Amino acid sequence: MSEQMRIMGSKELPEDLRDRIVARHRSGQGYKKISAALKSTVASIILKWKTFGMTRTLPRAGRPAKLSYRGRRALVREVKKNPKITVAELQRCSREMGEKSCRKSTITAALHQSGFMAEWPDGSLSSV
């Protein structure tokens, strides 16, 4: 597999490529020249190097969210459009939108964080 394909297949750039970007930045090359030469995004890597003094991928804090920010906004839109929608229906809508399957409690917690508090006995939600 070529280096270009290896880069395209992953979200993070290999460490040797990040080091080459920083080396070119130190030598005085601009962002456009570096990205044209290495076919890569440069600004975030140089910012990370300036901030932390390294290009290694740092550990992330906490567990990754099950619902994406975009999916959470879509659920909030659905509740605003239909306040009596049940959590089970929201779960179905979430899957239809292409989100990973998640529990009803995950959806309830996400809506709670977005300002929707009450859950009625029939399973529908209302905002406070």
Image (cartoon, grey):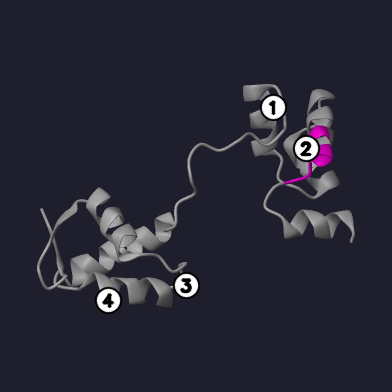
Q: Secondary structure at mark 3?
A: loop
- Kind of residue at badge 2: Arg
- Amino acid bearing label 3: Gly
> Which residue was labeled with disc 3?
98
Rounded to the nearest angstrom, the CA distance separating label 4 from label 2 is 45 Å
| Mark in front: 4 vs 2 | 4
Few, some or many residues within 10 Å of mark 2 (<14, 14–19, 20+): many
Q: Report which residue position mark 1 lands on.
A: 49
Residue drawn at the location 71% of the way across and 40% of the way down: 42
Among the two numbered marks 1 and 4 on one chain, the one whose residue lies closer to the N terminus: 1
Residue type at tag 1: Trp
Query: Mark 2 and 1 residues: CB-CB less than 8 Å, in contact?
Result: yes
Comparing marks 1 and 4, which lies closer to the viewer?
Answer: 4
Range of magenta residues: 13-19
Quick one: label 3 or label 1, which is nearer the N terminus? 1
SS of the residue at dot 1?
helix
Q: Where residue 89 is drawn, which disc sits there?
A: 4
Q: Residues within 10 Å of mark 3 (few under 14, many from 20)?
A: few
Sequence-wise, the earlier of marks 3 and 2 is 2
Residue situated in front as seen by the camera: 87 or 116: 87
The reply to whether the magenta stretch includes residue 86 is no
Labelled pair 4, 2 in contact (Cβ < 8 Å): no
The residue pinned by badge 2 equals 18
Callout 3 touching callout 4 (CB < 8 Å): no
Circle nearer the N terminus (2, 1): 2
Measure the alpha-carbon separation of dots 3 and 2. Answer: 32 Å
The answer to the question of whether label 3 and label 1 lie on touching residues, with beta carbons closer than 8 A, is no
Residue 29 placement (x, y as % from top left): 81, 31
**19 versus 75 height, above or below:** above
Measured as percent of width and height from the top left, residue 32 is found at: 75, 41
Q: Which of the 4 image quarters holds residue 74?
A: bottom left
Chief secondary structure of the magenta portion: helix
